[in-house]
Image (cartoon, helix red, strand yellow):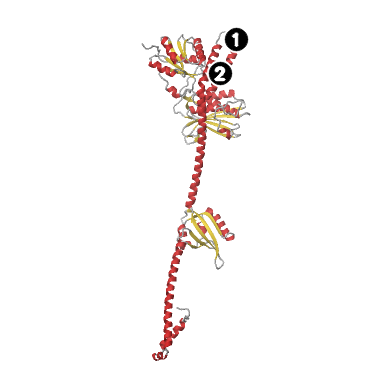
């Protein structure tokens, strides 16, 4: 329709049309044709306008329908819950996602207080959040826990805005997002980080222990290496000193000096023994052993040696405490711990030694190796009321030659106890608190068998020989001469050789005389074990007593070749040597030496 044509009044057009219909046909003939044509034209234009308006109305209705569909998609099907909450806290509007989030019907949900769906312990956080919205900031967010209709909790994040309607009422529009998966993922990540931190700490601790074990093993290997030569020196000094003490008419002053030499040599040998115990390379004689009677003897010894201001208590539970152990080494370990406790109580205190058993349910960790200690064990706890051990010192207390008591201590007491426990497949646990004392707990594998009767051991006595011929094979000239002098003094006839090759030549010359061969294990040209093998190949039957300054392991003793009746650890005393020789000569059937026909 053109802009210069005025838009007719619909009511006027209708009135005029009705008048025209009421007129008579003859009256219609009286109307000028121009007016009739104009009226018809106006009616046609009006009809077209009505059609256009109807089309526009249909288009508007269609757009309104599309808009409503879009509103449904954007509001009702949004991935978050939309809630409108009035000033009283009641839900006045909610989208479909919010309805599904709370698992309720929309008609039931509307009009209910929003706080009904907030977790009880988070109600305060919700009301504080709501007050902040109404009083201060028109936009707030918070995390809290909500519950579904059936009480199932979930984690939610609220993002709220305060709005005002045309009547001045304040409403809250809240966006509720279920963040349970995110919270669980964050918690899983925190748990993973804690585990990772724990694992890293364990790895660092394990690495530290490994480095410490390697360092201790290196010291042990070094100790075993020097033990042979050092024990040769000690053996010569010991044997010569003890032989000199038996010299008839010896002046008293010289005798006293020789006794000092023997005692100091013994102390030096004990020092070597401590190093060997630490390195777990010393010889141990394990057998079923009842700990309670042994501890009673040890406590009696400690009561005579420790200061009077230290009170000693021995606590033993009911029953027997049987372990497989070397009593001498066990006594040494307990005494070392007691002496360490004495040094921690310079003004006196209480030393408690307690025997107990694990029930199998406890689980603890070894201080030295870090292994988990579980199962059945026999526990010996040595507790003092002393100064305790500082944290920076605790990690090094079992290292040899580490001491806080210099110049009085040599740092081998705890190291020796550690080595003894490891040789007995045991563990050590240390608990300490600065100013409140320390507890060393020794763990031994328990034996189920009953204790066998212990045979009393007589004091060693120098056994005299009956003129038997003994061949000494030793590369150290001084020690070989000392051994020969002792055996001759004990009424034995002695032949000498510097190595296994010379020993074979001597045996060929004196095949009918030699009753026993005392041979060093390690020698140049041919060592003791090679000598035994050669004797077997040549079918020379003679008993061999092996002499060694090296630490002797259980595997070495178990793999002792045929013909070796025993071992002698350097440095032997005169009494020990005489006892071992007499025992070797009496051990097994009488053997004769015979060479091949060639």
Instruction: Sort mark 2 into few (<14), some (14-19) or many (20+) by Cα contacts within 10 Å.
Output: many
Residue at point 49%, 51% (across, down): 183
Decide: marks 1, 2 in contact (CB < 8 A)? no
Which disc is residue 265 wearing? 2
Among all residues in the image, which is located at the extreme top?
249
Q: Nearer the viewer, mark 1 or mark 2?
A: 2
Tell which of 348 and 492 is nearer to you.
492
Instruction: Sort mark 1 into few (<14), some (14-19) or many (20+) by Cα contacts within 10 Å.
Output: few
Alpha carbons under labels 1 and 2: distance apart: 21 Å
The location of residue 402, given as percent across then percent down, is 57, 29
The location of residue 214, given as percent across then percent down, is 50, 30
Residue 109 vs 484, above or below: the answer is below
- For label 1, the residue is 251
Pointer 1 or 2: first along the chain: 1
In the picture, the quarter occupied by the N terminus is bottom left
Residue at point 43%, 23% (across, down): 558
Among all residues in the image, which is located at the extreme right?
347
Q: Is residue 266 left or right of residue 105?
A: right
Residue 509 vs 207, above or below: the answer is above
Can the viewer see residue 440 in this picture? yes
The location of residue 228, given as percent across then percent down, is 50, 20
């Amino acid at each position: 329709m053109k802009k210069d044509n005025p838009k007719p009044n619909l009511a006027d057009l209708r009135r005029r049309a009705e008048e025209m219909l009421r007129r008579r046909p003859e009256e219609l003939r009286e109307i000028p044709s121009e007016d009739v044509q104009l009226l018809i034209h106006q009616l046609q234009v009006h009809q077209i306008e009505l059609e256009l308006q109807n089309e526009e109305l249909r288009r508007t209705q269609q757009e309104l329908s599309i808009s409503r569909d879009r509103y449904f998609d954007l509001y009702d099907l949004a991935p978050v819950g939309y809630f409108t909450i009035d000033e009283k806290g009641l839900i006045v509007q909610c989208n479909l996602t919010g309805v599904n989030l709370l698992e309720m019907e929309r008609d039931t949900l509307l009009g209910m207080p929003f706080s009904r769906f907030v977790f009880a312990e988070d109600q305060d956080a919700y009301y504080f959040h709501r007050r902040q919205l109404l009083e201060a900031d028109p936009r707030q967010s918070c995390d809290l826990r909500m519950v579904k209709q059936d009480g199932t909790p979930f984690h939610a994040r609220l993002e709220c805005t305060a709005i005002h309607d045309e009547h001045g009422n304040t409403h809250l529009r809240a966006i509720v997002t279920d963040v349970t998966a995110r919270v669980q993922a964050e918690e899983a990540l925190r748990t993973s980080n804690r585990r990772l931190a724990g694992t890293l700490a364990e790895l660092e601790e394990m690495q530290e222990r490994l480095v410490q074990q390697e360092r201790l093993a290196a010291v042990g290997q070094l100790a075993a290496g020097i033990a042979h030569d050092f024990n040769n020196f000690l053996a010569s000094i010991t044997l010569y000193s003890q032989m000199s003490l038996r010299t008839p008419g010896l002046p008293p002053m010289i005798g006293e000096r020789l006794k000092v030499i023997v005692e100091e040599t013994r102390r030096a040998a004990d020092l070597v023994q401590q190093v060997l115990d630490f390195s777990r390379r010393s010889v141990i004689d394990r057998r079923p052993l009842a700990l309670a009677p042994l501890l009673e003897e040890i406590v009696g010894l400690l009561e005579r040696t420790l200061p009077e201001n230290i009170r000693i208590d021995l606590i033993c539970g009911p029953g027997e405490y049987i372990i497989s152990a070397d009593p001498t080494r066990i006594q040494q370990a307990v005494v070392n711990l007691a002496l360490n406790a004495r040094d921690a109580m310079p003004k006196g205190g209480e030393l408690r030694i307690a025997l107990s058993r694990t029930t199998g349910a406890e689980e603890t960790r070894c201080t030295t190796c870090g292994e988990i200690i579980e199962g059945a064990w026999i526990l010996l706890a040595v507790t003092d009321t002393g100064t305790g051990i500082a944290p920076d010192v605790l990690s090094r207390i079992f290292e040899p030659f580490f001491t806080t008591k210099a110049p009085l201590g040599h740092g081998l007491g705890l190291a020796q106890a550690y080595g003894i426990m490891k040789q007995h497949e045991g563990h050590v646990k240390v608990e300490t608190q600065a100013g409140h004392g320390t507890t060393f707990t020794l763990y031994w594998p328990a034996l189920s068998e009953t204790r066998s009767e212990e045979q009393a051991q007589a004091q060693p006595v120098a056994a005299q020989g009956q003129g038997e011929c003994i061949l000494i094979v030793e590369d150290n000239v001084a020690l070989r001469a000392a051994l020969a002098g002792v055996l001759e003094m004990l009424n034995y006839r002695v032949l000498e050789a510097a190595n296994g090759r010379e020993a074979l030549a001597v045996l060929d010359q004196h095949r009918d005389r030699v009753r026993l061969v005392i041979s060093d294990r390690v020698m140049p040209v041919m060592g003791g074990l090679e000598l035994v093998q050669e004797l077997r190949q040549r079918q020379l039957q003679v008993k061999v007593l092996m002499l060694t300054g090296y630490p002797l392991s259980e595997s070495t003793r178990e793999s002792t070749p045929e013909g070796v009746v025993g071992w002698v650890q350097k440095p032997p005393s005169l009494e020990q040597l005489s006892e071992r020789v007499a025992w070797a000569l009496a051990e097994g059937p009488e053997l004769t030496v015979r060479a091949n026909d060639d």
